[in-house]
Image (cartoon, coloured by chain):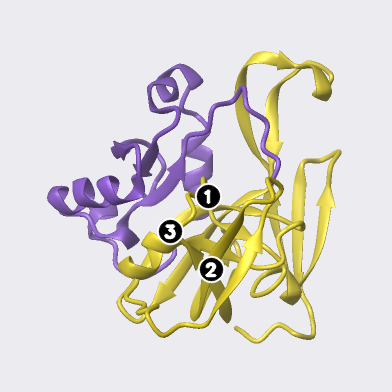
Amino acid sequence: MSDKNQQGGIPDLSRFLANRDLIPWEKLQPYVGQYVAWTLDGTRIVASAPDRETLGLKLQQAGFNSSQVVHEYVDNPELSFHG
Amino acid sequence: MTLKFSYHRFRSPRPIWTLQNSLFRPRPTIFVTVKGPGGAWNELGLVDTGSDDTVFPGYVARIIGLDLTQAPTRTASGVGKVPAVIHLAEVILKITDGREIREWPARDGFTSTPLKSPLLGFAGFLQYFSANFQGDQEVLELTVNSLYPGT
């Protein structure tokens, strides 16, 4: 899989965001409150966990390193964010 | 010279009254890579004009090979007024809008306080750009300024 093998460089942002935004909310709903790791092309989630440490372990076991995925916290859309 | 980012539109299951019943909550989150001596980390970060510093989760520091045991610290507080310790370190930041890539050295913070996403604040990030937040277009334009130290 090319995404998994990509080293170093910045992924194609336009492709990631465009693909990631095609994912219907219903498919993301199970991940609310979780940290997820996306493929670099934004087409699928390869691992999820309630905290970054557990997600890191899952990724390690699956053969990914941190530069080969995009991390995101799936926020509860009913909560507004006040930084 | 100018990077253009569309706001990320977070879908809401219910209309948002404060946004004229929109079903989307737009936020200026952009893709950022932080690099250290031992690796790199990609995440969607929130461009936050209210944050004095650029702050990543402490876990990220370990992954990218930063040793924070001797790092200088400072205390920060958020909107909840709960103080948090952040460890400061030099890293490399990279952003791209898919057309242009910017990479620069930055002095950022790392905190063990749980963060939903990295905060791309003034020090290390916004200080190097002129930022144009276009609320009507839900677009953020970042133009490098005279302080920008990168490529």
Q: Which mark is residue B86?
A: 2
Name the residue tied to disc 3.
B42
Relative image position of residue B107 (x, y in whole percent): 58, 79
- The answer to whether dots 2 and 1 both sit on one chain is yes
**Chain for mark 1?**
B
**Chain for mark 2?**
B
Relative image position of residue B123 (x, y in whole percent): 68, 74
Secondary structure, mark 2, is: strand
Q: Tell me which amino acid carries mark 1.
A: Ser
Relative image position of residue A37 (x, y in whole percent): 35, 44
Distance in Å between CA atoms under marks 3 and 1: 11 Å
Relative image position of residue B48 (x, y in whole percent): 70, 55
* Mark 1 Cα-neighbour bin, 10 Å: few <14, some 14–19, many ≥20: many
The chain letter corresponding to yellow is B
Secondary structure, mark 1, is: loop
* Mark 3 Cα-neighbour bin, 10 Å: few <14, some 14–19, many ≥20: many
The chain letter corresponding to purple is A
Secondary structure, mark 3, is: strand
Q: Is residue A52 left or right of residue B92?
A: left
Q: Tell me which amino acid carries mark 2.
A: Ile
Quadrant position of residue B62:
bottom left
Distance in Å between CA atoms under marks 2 and 1: 15 Å
Q: For the point 29% across and 51% down, which residue is it?
A: A53
Q: For the point 77% across and 41% down, which residue is it?
A: B138
Name the residue tied to disc 1.
B117
Q: Is residue B35 above or below residue B134?
A: below
